[in-house]
Image (cartoon, rainbow, N blue to C red):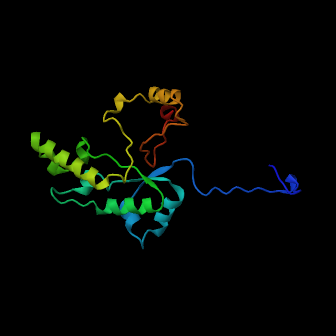
Amino acid sequence: VTTSGGINKNDVDIHIVQTSQSFPWGTAVNVYKYNENAAHGKYRDFIHKHFTWAVPENALKWPSIEPTRGHRNYQPALDFINGVRHHGLKVRGHNLVWSVDRWVQDWVKQLHGDELRNVVKHHIDETMAKTCNLCYEVYKSTDSREMDYLQQARRVKAANVGLYGLGVQCHFGENHNPDIHAVR
């Protein structure tokens, strides 16, 4: 500490108040709870206070958007995205399609060939058009086996980009204690 005007630096107290988080920290958010203003104000306030990133838990997943063919509803997801962005949070999207049977609508399972490809493409195109510039792109590859994160991190560091850490997206159940060695 340097002082001027004859002030003794030992007589100066400095207090630092962190007004925002510098470390990106995110969570999946129950969009329906978040959007219900009266009933879940504390939930929404908690999200705004403690996180810098948010993922619409299920509202941008295809079964939530279009549970029945031709009946689409993006509004809950869009209301959520606009709400958290208004409070300074960044939004990360989720998957656009899954190949896991239990997460695919029955009507989609009935489709085959070109009809299936066209319906999937239409869903992706429409979802991207509705969320364009609202969510951040995270994944560059559709096959995680192609990604060698350690090598990628080394390339970034070698380019002096300023890599300070790597993040992990994962699901931990309430009664599941992850093996910290596997996470490392």
**Labels in figure, total:** 0
- Pick out the residue farthest to the bottom: 38
For image coordinates 39% across by 42% down, the residue present is 138
Counting from the top left corner in percent of width and height, residue 62 is at 25, 51
Residue 108 picture location, percent across and down: 16, 48
Q: Residue at x 57, y 52 (%)?
A: 21
Q: Is residue 156 above or below residue 125?
A: above
Across and down, in percent, residue 70 comes to 15, 57
**Residue 122 spot, x, y in % from top left:** 18, 49
Viewer-side residue, 18 vs 60: 18
The image quadrant that residue 80 belongs to is: bottom left
Q: Residue sitting at 41 percent across and 64 percent down?
A: 34
In the drawing, does residue 141 fall left or right of residue 101? right
At 44% from the left and 45% from the top, the residue drawn is 172
Between 90 and 6, the residue placed more toward the observer is 6
